Amino acid sequence: MSQAVINENEVDIVIGALHSDLTTFMNEWKPIFSRFHLIIIKDPDLKEELRIPEGFSVDVYTKSEIERVVGSSTSVRFSGYSCRYFGFLISRKKYVVCIDDDCVPAKDNLGILVDAVAQHIVNLQTPATPFFFNTLYDPFCKGADFVRGYPFSLRSGVDCALSCGLWLNLADLDAPTQALKPGQRNLRYVDAVVTVPSRAMVPVSGINIAFNREVVGPALVPALRLAGEGKLRWETMEDIWCGMCVKVICDHLGLGVKSGLPYVWRTERGDAIQSLKKEWEGVKLMEDVVPFFQSLRLPQSATTAEDCVVEMAKTVKEQLGKVDPMFSAAAEAMEEWVKLWKSVRSV
Amino acid sequence: MSQAVINENEVDIVIGALHSDLTTFMNEWKPIFSRFHLIIIKDPDLKEELRIPEGFSVDVYTKSEIERVVGSSTSVRFSGYSCRYFGFLISRKKYVVCIDDDCVPAKDNLGILVDAVAQHIVNLQTPATPFFFNTLYDPFCKGADFVRGYPFSLRSGVDCALSCGLWLNLADLDAPTQALKPGQRNLRYVDAVVTVPSRAMVPVSGINIAFNREVVGPALVPALRLAGEGKLRWETMEDIWCGMCVKVICDHLGLGVKSGLPYVWRTERGDAIQSLKKEWEGVKLMEDVVPFFQSLRLPQSATTAEDCVVEMAKTVKEQLGKVDPMFSAAAEAMEEWVKLWKSVRSV
């Protein structure tokens, strides 16, 4: 990892609490999180009181705060994994780091605890290189560089807007794969950060991400929800859809998306077999979603993330709306989200 | 690495001998190379007799054999690093593996000797996934898989035509970077193979590559030579140009290009400061070469690598020929190369 000067005042850590007892989670992350301000959003469906250990600078938001801010909006929903988006909405910081509450810090190949927050911020603070592939991965990483043949005019790179981290132990697989290979564990620590090339689509997992909220915040939108979406990652589509939106918007605005380090250690949760029935719905939708985003081009007049989301919503409605009513609902949520984003900013 | 069934009869290892004494090189590689047939091409500029240790199945080709096969052609040149292309031309095997003679086998993070040939063949025998980025890298690698959100329709992948390996110790940097950071060594062993996404351009280094000769052999063409091109990698452009040709052709034909494992250990050679004057020529050319290849589209009528090279040569002549006469010479070499390829096949 490169040396990073991290200003604590520029970072919010957003946690969506899908479980009431955050004690173990928070204590495991204490060495890394305690410097930063935390925003915890309690899943509105969760009945029990949250248990949060002491020693953190934390603001907790529950159903009543969400309703007060969101008001009468019904198209944007903040239940389940989507509760974290409320944290994105109310954060005032430059960077947001967001990690699922079933993950703990990972260790690298040398057995050293990975500071996922620091690595995410380094990823966001160093340039991305979406216009030409560097075979030695991130050229801004310590000890690395641009390889022979890399055009000098492209070496300054572009601003990085989204950093997608990975997972050791339980990888982020879909329910069919998880059900098929219940014993499979991801133990390969790949010591690299890659800029996902421009125009290449990528399945962004919401488990372990960070982004420049000032630049692409409005693009991280809770839009697509499966009818039977539950409280298990492999049942969700919200982050995959959101990631496609962000990637297309970053490509349009000339920003970068990185994938790779940092890893988190995912602990086990849920029964993949039970989820199989639900997940196939999401799996089927991807066959329409991916070609749609691959061919989507935004008008030159869209110069901000807000503009882009609004334009994208129109096209989603026109082109995908006829495929499945869930897409029309997603388009509505995208429009509503931009209104919410603007109204929260104007307070 | 996945389990691979490697048929020795399908593999040629091609070595361009730029140094007369191959004793150390060959002995270091003996545990890996000795199963396979080797084609050694002696750089026609090299005066001394080659020294090759015993214990290998090897055919050596020198200036006189090259002249006999190539005849009166003057636009295709086989001197310096380009001598290896003669090996590509005369090989009859399905796969060609090609490694510079200043490289020895690398060790992985566990200290185990890397079998670069086996890894290259695995890369070529398992599918590539150029149409969607898999965040866990090569999904066909043991223990890995496609992540949630990866469309099932794209999971069968496409045939992989080119495998680009990497380098530990002395990375493949250009002369300015090498001169600026003479002490820099690449010590980061990244345990991954990545499919370079479709339409993303990549600087292919010829130091450590393998390809499916039956599918893309003609696309590996010695075409662009700098006026002052010497006997040092950082002074050459032939492989970078060739790599762009192959990438565009693979994208056009729906084939994949992988980058990453296997690593080789590059030993030191040459004085980067002395090369600086020459290399800037190549560095400047890249500013025209990269946008050209990024926007290049081949006609649907081009359905083989030969067709593609011929079509590409036309466009190079038309569009780049006016920029620099070196490009016109490259276009001529490309046309001549396809003729040579066909004439050698017809014997």
Image (cartoon, coloured by chain):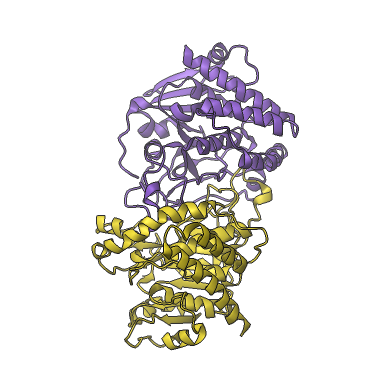
Chain colours: A yellow, B purple
Quadrant where the image shows the N terminus of chain B: top left
Q: Relative to the observer, which residue lies in front, B127 or A249?
A: A249
B269 is higher (above) or lower (below) than B144: above
Which residue sits at x=58%, y=62%? A160
Among the 4 quarters of the image, the one containing residue B114: top left
Residue B275 in the image, given as x and y percentages of width and height: 68, 38
**With B205 as the anchor, is B2 left or right in this view?**
left
Residue A57 in the image, given as x and y percentages of width and height: 48, 85
Q: Relative to the observer, which residue lies in front, B185 or A17?
A: A17
Which residue sits at x=56%, y=37%? B248
Which residue sits at x=24%, y=62%? A273
Q: Relative to the observer, which residue lies in front, A2 or A197?
A: A197
Residue B150 in the image, given as x and y percentages of width and height: 40, 54
Q: Residue A1: in sight, yes or no?
A: no
What is the total number of numbered labels drawn onto the structure image? Answer: 0
**With B335 as the anchor, is A102 left or right in this view?**
left
Q: Residue A226: in sight, yes or no?
A: yes
B274 is higher (above) or lower (below) than A4: above
Residue A232 in the image, given as x and y percentages of width and height: 33, 69
Which residue sits at x=30%, y=41%? B3
A218 is higher (above) or lower (below) than A241: below
